[in-house]
Image (cartoon, rainbow, N blue to C red):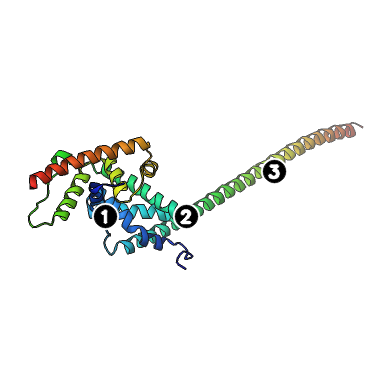
Amino acid sequence: MEGAEPRTFASVLRAQQSMVFSIAYHFLRDRPAAEEVAQDVFLQLHKRFDEFESDAHLSFWLRKVASNRCIDYVRKRKSQAAVALDDAPAPSVDGQPQDHFLNRRLQSLIASLPEKPRMVMILRYQEDMMPEEIASAMDMPVRTVKSHLQRSLAMLREKIDRSMGDVR
Amino acid sequence: MMDDFEKQLQAALGRKEPSPFFEARVLGAAKREARDRRASIRMWWASAVAAILIVAAGSAWQHQRSEQAREDAAGRDAKARLEVALRITSVKLQKISQKVEGI
């Protein structure tokens, strides 16, 4: 039976690499940097692998550590200044299908959010985490998470409406 | 309940796969880190054992030195007492000798 198989570091790495890498990739928008952060997260996991009793605990820990590592990484890399939301470049629409254009535009706008709201959005919409879970993973009050979500959503809606209007 | 915009956000934030070599690279790095960690633990133990041996040898040497010093002091003391005893005996013998000569 699949559930009876012993959990090994290699099996966890195989199962969770996409989740950890995607959090880092959507946050950093830089593939090598995202792989570097994801590798750090898994190396930290390797050191304390025996401490985890359940898969749920392990997944929660991976999301929490990945979020913190991404924010730390950006803070350390001062040279990479965050792009202001108003200055976020709109990608070219020539020959792009509408959904692809919208996805690219949304990714670009999410990447331009400040660090904490950006991570809140990624955990909510990539990982489908509830505000309470995000609050616990990011060590912040639930009402702060909800406020980040509401404000980010409102800003993104406004920006996307405006850019769609420009395209039309 | 998510609206269409939130569903679009979910689609935009879909999971991505790392490069095909990512898994092998992490496993290799984890193996190297574990090996380095074991080596540093061994080094720590070796240093601790070496430190204990140095302290033990030092205190044994110190103990031996103080024993030797005590024995030397006892020897000097015995020699001094013997000299005093010989001097007293010599004086007594001299007196006896003078008395004998006076008879």
Seen from the viewer's position, the closer of residues A83 and B94 is A83
- The answer to whether residue A84 is seen in the rendering is no
Distance, label 2 to label 1, CA atoms, is 25 Å
Query: Which-is-in-front pick, marks 3 and 2?
Result: 2
Tell me whether marks 2 and 1 sit on the same chain. no
Q: Earlier in the sequence, mark 3 or mark 1?
A: 1
Residue at the spot of label 3:
B71
Q: Give the amino acid type for the residue marked by disc 3 in the picture.
A: Glu
Residue B13, percent across and down?
25, 52
Rate crowding at label 3 as few (under 14), some (14 to 19) or many (20 or more) other CA atoms within 10 Å. Answer: few
- Total numbered labels placed on residues in the image: 3
Report which quarter residue B20 is drawn in.
bottom left
Callout 2: SS: loop
Residue A54, disc? 2
Label 3 in the same subunit as label 1: yes
B82 shown above or below B18: above
Residue type at tag 2: Ser
**Mark 1 surroundings: few (<14), some (14-19) or many (≥20) residues within 10 A:** some
Q: Nearer the viewer, mark 3 or mark 1?
A: 1
Q: Which mark is residue A48?
A: none
Residue at 37% over, 41% down? A135
Q: Which mark is residue B14?
A: 1
Verify CB contact (< 8 Å) between mark 3 and mark 2: no
**Place of residue B64 in the rendered image (x, y in percent of width and height, measured from the top left):** 64, 47
Quadrant location, the C terminus of chain B: top right
Asked if residue B74 lies left or right of residue A16, the reply is right
CA separation, marks 3 and 1?
Answer: 86 Å
Chain on which label 2 sits: A
